[in-house]
Structure formats: C-alpha cells, structure tokens
Amino acid sequence: MYEFFIEPLTYGFMARGLLVTLIAALVCALLSCWLVLMGWSLMGDAISHAVLPGVALAYILGAPFALGALVAALLAVTLIGAVSRQGRVKEDAAIGIVFTVMFALGLVLISVTPSQTDLHSIILGNVLGVSWADVAQIAALAAVVISLLLVKRRDLVLYAFDPGYTQAIGLRPALLSGLLLLALALTSVLALQIVGVVLVVALLVIPGSTARLLTDRFTSMLVISSAVSVTGAVTGFYLSYALDISAGGAVVLVLGFLFALAYLLAPGQGLISRKKKERTGA
Amino acid sequence: MTQTHTSQPLLAAQNLRVNYGEVQALTGASLTLKAGEICGLVGMNGSGKSTLFKAIMGVVPASGQVSIAGLAPAAARRQGLVSYVPQKEEIDFSFPLSVRDLVSQGRYGKLGITRRLRADDRQAVDQALARVGLTDLADRQIGQLSGGQRKRAFVARGLAQEAQLILLDEPFAGVDKSSENMLISLFKELRDAGAGILISTHDLANLADLADRAALLRQTILMEGPPRQVLAPENLVRAFGMDPLASPTRED
C-alpha cells in the first residue's frame, strides 16, 4: 500500500500533481452541477476550447493565463451571441463555428511560438509538470470560483430552474449567466493544466451528470458530484503513474467508468431498475 | 398587501411591440389592470400571451411603455411587486428541487446575498404551503407531484413572495378539477386582499365566473371588458375567425 500510494508522493512533482488534480477535480465537480442543469454542456465544451488562443497569447506576452483565458472566453460568448442573433444560423451551429475557429487560432499561435513544449502541455495536459507557482495560482483561482459558486448557489439554482421568475423578482439573469461564464472560463484555465484543453469538458460534464442520476436533491448533487470527480481524478492519477499512461486520459476514463456504473445501477433512474419496472409493469 | 394609489392602475402597459426575428409577436398591445382585479387574457395558440407576460416582466425586449404601481418595471421587480407562474412546458420537473425549495424561492427578493432563509421567511413558506394544501408533500421532489399539485406549488411561491401583481400563464392546463377549484378560490382571496391578477387561459367556460374582466389578444388587444360581453360567441368569431369553444385548442 505504502509503496503504491505514498512513495510516489515523495517526489515533489508527484505531490504537486496530486494536489492540483484534487483541486481541479473539486472545482469542476461543483460547476458541473449547474452546467448540467442549465443544459450548458456544449457551452462548457466551447468555452474550454475557446480559451486556447487567450492562454497562448498570455504565454507569449508573459501575462497570467487566467487573464488571457477570460478575454478569450468573453470574446467567444460575444461572437456566439452575434452569430446566433443573425437568425438563420442556430445557436448550436454558432457555438460550433466560434469555438473551433478560436481553437484553431490557438493552435496556429502555438505553432509559431519558439518554445512549444509548455504549450503542448496546455492542449493535452501535463499534471506532472506543474511548479509550486502553478499550484499557488491554481489554488487561488479555485478559491475564487468555489466562493462565487457557493455564495450565489441559490440564485444560480433559481436561474437554472426558472429564468423568467428570476427576472420577475428583480434578480438579474444576465448577471447570473455572466457569473457562470466567468466561473467557466476560470475553471477551464485551472482544469486544462491537468487534463488539457481537449478533455476539460469531461470534468465539466461527467461528475454533475453522474450525480444527477443518483439524487433528487441539489445539495446532495454537489456532494456526490465532488465525490465522483475526486475519486475519478485520484484513481486516474495513480493509474497513470502505475501503468505509465496519459494522466488526463486515465482520469477521464475512470470518470466514464463511474458514470457507466451510475447509468446502469442507479436506484430508480438506472437502466437496470428501469427495465425491472417495465417488466413488472409498475 | 398594501394598496397603492387608488387612481393609478397597478399595471399599465402601452403599445407593446415585440419582434422575434421577422415574426411580429406583439404589434402594439395595451392593457391596464387595477389592484383588486382579475383579468383573463384570452387568445389562440401563438397569439402572444406568453410574450405579453415576458414583455411586462422585461424578459424579452419590447418597445412601448410599462409601469407597475406607478414605478418603472425594473424598480417594481426589485421591490418584489411582481410574481410569475410559468406554464408547465417551460419547467423541467425532473430538476433536483423539493416543493419547499420551490416555495422558498418566493422569499429570495427580500433576503441577503446568499438567500439564507430567516425564521420569519420559513414561517411565510410554511403558511404558503398550508394555504395550497401541500404541507405534507413539502419534501417531495417537484416531479413527484400531480399536475394540479405542481401548479399549486408555483402559486404558493407567489404567496410566499407577497406580490401585488401576479402573472399566471395557463394555470389551469393539465390541472385536475379539485386543484382548479382550490386555485380559483385562492385567486379570488388574493384579489380581495388587493392583488391584481392577470391570467392567460384557454378555459373559457370558467372565465366568466373567475375574472372581473377579460381581454382578447391576437398580437394586440382586440377587445377588453366584462367577460360575458368579451367572450360572447360573436366576438370570439370576429376576433379569431372561429369559435374556440367549438374546436379543440392547443397550448402556446
């Protein structure tokens, strides 16, 4: 046991890797609950990809990644809004166009940058490459996002559930949706260092969806989502060490496995219990 | 509920226009509602009933003027004067929310930044639940209620809010008879306590009994007045080119 779980952590890079994996998994898990309830999975996919040119530019200019990501996320949302308002292009197409083009711009920016190693780790993640400075930055971002989400959690739930009523009682739906976008952009920056831009959406969608299958209470959903995400992240982290496989890939595979378990076995909602109900005619 | 200035209407909407792309949903609708009055809003599928509600609440951008209790709409909303019961198609009933959570949302406008309920808020929520007969079902997830109970839960949210202007979009659709009766007597109680209630409905048969006034909508208010007069068959035929009572109608 010691050999498998603790010994690797005596290497500084492993300890740092595990720490940021835990932090990112937790933040993604919380945000995931709202994204899933809002039907924002595609938006999560889009924003997490669209931050790439911002992050690349920030890298080139020596600015903080989070700042670059925020600007890029804002630009992506503005462009998506502008394209879908045109009328004939529906929102899902607008999202598809904007995020892939921005992602492509990110790839091009990376290809013209002399030092490509660090930027490649942005695309595929490099959890073992984080420095203590990165850990500090990730922890700070995580603290901001978690505080935002928990302080405004009731408003965000109301907004996800009934935006019309949210407006009627004088709260500001536009502000709340902006808040979620901000959380999404910051979370993307934080999570991409673990699993990379390409797989961030898995951390943003799978934990919340899994929890959705297992509970009818929002508070339990936050807890279950966090448990699923942290379990998946830590298991994947150790598997990647033990089997010498991609850490991001391993984390997402474990999350997928946990979702499949819930999908099949969830009481009441799972495939097996639904088939049983059909058979007994209940 | 405090009555505002008696001379000024609770709701005054003037010349509301809303376009969705090239579709004109409202083309200059005007409507007033006094405190202590129930107004039935009648129109066919696509006549703009939901859009009119959304324009009053400021959810969709509209040109024209809205004033609520003499205030600009945004100020009235911030004061918690406006409540809204959406039609059932707009709600995801598998949402992880209990009946009590739902009714508690009625208090949010009065609460601090985290919307944590205080003792008097919890009391208001309990009272609202009791008034709609859902005390025993308060901890159920909302999807586990019947159609009528669901609607009562949303009305309880408006009760907990203590709003003056209550907008109800198709409150009787998919509702059983006993819930319908309970809702009707609740609406009358609220009206008698001074609230102004605007109800969109297909349920023309009961409207004369429920509403003090009716308005016919087809992209604009074609006619308004006493329900029996407005809903006379010749008016309905003139307004819609058909008699809605004689044919099955669909929902918006």
Image: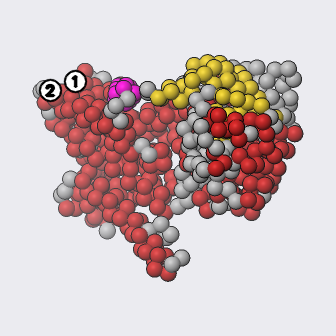
Residue B191 x, y percent position in the rendering = 83, 39
Residue drawn at (44%, 32%), measured in percent from left and top? A182
Classify 10 Å Cα crowding around label 1: few (below 14), some (14-19), many (20 and above).
some
- At horizontal 19% and vertical 56% (from top left) the residue drawn is A245
The magenta span reads A74-86
Q: At 73% from the left edge and 59% from the top edge, which residue is drawn?
A: B177
Residue B184, relative to residue B197: is it above or below? Answer: below
State the image coordinates of residue B212 (x, y, percent, origin top left).
Answer: 81, 37
Q: Which mark is residue A222?
A: none
Q: Is residue A127 left or right of residue B176?
A: left
Q: Secondary structure at mark 2?
A: loop
Q: Is residue A184 visible?
A: yes
**Amino acid bearing label 1:** Ile
**Extreme-front residue of the structure:** B234
Q: Are marks 1 and 2 in contact (CB under 8 Å)?
A: yes
Residue on which the image places disc 2: A113
Element carrying mark 1: helix
Foreground residue, B102 or B199?
A: B199
Chain on which label 1 sits: A
Amino acid type, label 2: Thr
Q: Main secondary structure of the magenta part?
A: helix
Q: Earlier in the sequence, mark 1 or mark 2?
A: 1
The chain letter under disc 2 is: A
Q: Which residue lies under the disc numbered 1?
A: A60
Q: Are marks 1 and 2 on the same chain?
A: yes
Residue displayed at 78% across by 36% down: B229
Residue A168 makes an appearance in the image: no
- In the rendered image, the quadrant that contains the N terminus of chain A is bottom left
Tell me if B194 is positioned left or right of B14 in this view.
Answer: right
Asked whether residue A84 is drawn in magenta, I would say yes
